[in-house]
Amino acid sequence: MSSLHTWAGLLLGWILYAMFLTGTVSYFKDELSQWMRPELPRLSQIPDQAVVAQRIADELSDIAPGTSQWSIRLPDARNNSVYAFWRTPAGNPGGRGFGEANFDPATGQRVTSRGTLGGEFFYRFHFQFHYMPVVWGRWLAGAAAMFMLVAIVSGVITHKKIFVDFFTFRWGKGQRSWLDAHNAFSVFGLPFHFMITYTGLVTMMALYMPWGERVAFKNPAEQQQLNAELSAFIQPGKPSGQKVPLASVEDMVRQAQERWGRDNVGRVNAVHPGDAAARVAVTRGEAGRVSMSPQYMEFEGTTGKLLAVREDVGAAAETRGVLYALHLGRFGDTVTRWLYFLVSFMGTAMVGSGLVMWTVKRRQKLPDPDRPYFGFRLVERLNIASIAGLSIAMTAFLWANRLLPHPLEGRANWEIDLFFIVWAFTLLHALVRPAKSAWVEQLWAASALLFLLPVLNAVTTQRPLWHSLAEGDWVFAGVDIMCWALAALHAVLAIRTARQETRSQFRRKTSREAPTAVASGGAAG
């Protein structure tokens, strides 16, 4: 069990660390997206969602005529803009198959904010890793999650005194300190770590274990029924070819508001808008619902007649919906999201401390700690780039958001490219520098970049910290303050690492000199 725990945690530990850290940040992805689009004004209150839906539906009829499907995400307490996407006709010159844009909820016009994926990049990277094909990325994420599950179970079995050790921490004791920290981070959030790992596998179970679904649902009607229980997107049938304008979307949303509450509508989805076969689904929001199972009202698009209300799914689908919601944490208020963030951050520290402990523990057993073998050097360098280097790369992504020119073509992709370029440079730095120096230098670099980010925001935008505090804009103020808190954390780690390495060098020097002194004394005698 001890060996299983060690190697299950190490072999994909660097991927797990990246998944945990980017997943932790993703609990505030909507707020981070607001910070990365400073041109969009703060919403002091949520606008009437029914009026906004009608505005955007009218705008989409002009910019996306002939589309087979569009979807509108309405503004809420965490989103100050309206996001919409639509299918483009076959043979469209853009070649993407869909269009997307953010809209001002007050005017219904496209917003002219800088091109960026915002916090959505970290969320997608968390389980897709961006550059590789989506399916491959999700398979890799699933393999890493399974390794994590094995490491958690074997870790509990291995550490018989894990709950006793939780209350013991010996600071500045080298390997013992890393083990104490690893135990503390593991035990404090153990139920959360198990839940978040298992539910992560459940969210993509249809990809990892598709055979039961393929056997059980063989004809299209059964497959369509399954999709209806898992998603609020109506399956588009064939258009009639008869042009009929869409009925009042505002009235449809009003009916949903009467059922679920004024600010509790999440999306409006339409298939074949402008055609006699049009259908519209108004979906309930995610806030306050500990289930991702869809709840929606389906309307006839041409008349606005209510066709069906879908608020219940089967037991299996509801179980999946609850587990999915527990993983995403979108049901919670601000306090709940902060609890998710803090415990998930401890999970990140658990993985990171485990990776570091592997090298600390084995360095003492090396014949010559200053000249370790290749495998040890590889793990040590990957640790540096994966832990300290990822902090630098993620902060560089935010710096790129403020420094890249707005009209730059493919600006959103450039932000992502710079994230990976900087991350690659941290690996190169870790390979060419002594490990002790690389740790300290990269931790200090991350601290400096995080500390200066609010200064950069104040210089490049009209929303510096003092203005945000005066206006009560806690999204912008929160990001700036959090950057300084994380800068302080990285500075403390850099100082502690430098002191620890100095003590380690002194102990190794003393241990080498001791045999010489004994030998000299023996010869003199």
Image (tube, rainbow, N blue to C red):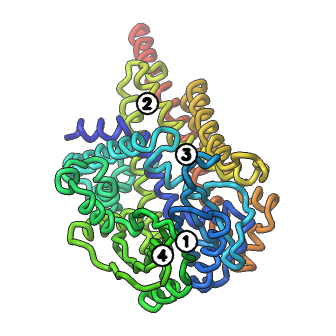
- Identify the mark nearer the N-term, 1 or 4: 1
Mark 2 residue type: Val
Q: Which residue is mark 3?
A: 496
- Identify the mark nearer the N-term, 3 or 2: 2
Q: Is residue 97 visible?
A: yes
Q: Position of residue 96 (x, y in %)?
A: 57, 48
Quadrant holding the C terminus: top left
| Image point (82%, 59%), residue name | 459
| Image point (56%, 66%), residue name | 30
Q: Which residue is mark 2?
A: 379
Q: Nearer the viewer, residue 406 or 222?
A: 222
Q: Nearer the viewer, mark 3 or mark 2?
A: 2
Mark 1 residue type: Lys
| Image point (37%, 82%), residue name | 307
Element class at badge 2: helix
Q: Which residue is mark 4?
A: 335
Q: Nearer the viewer, mark 1 or mark 2?
A: 1
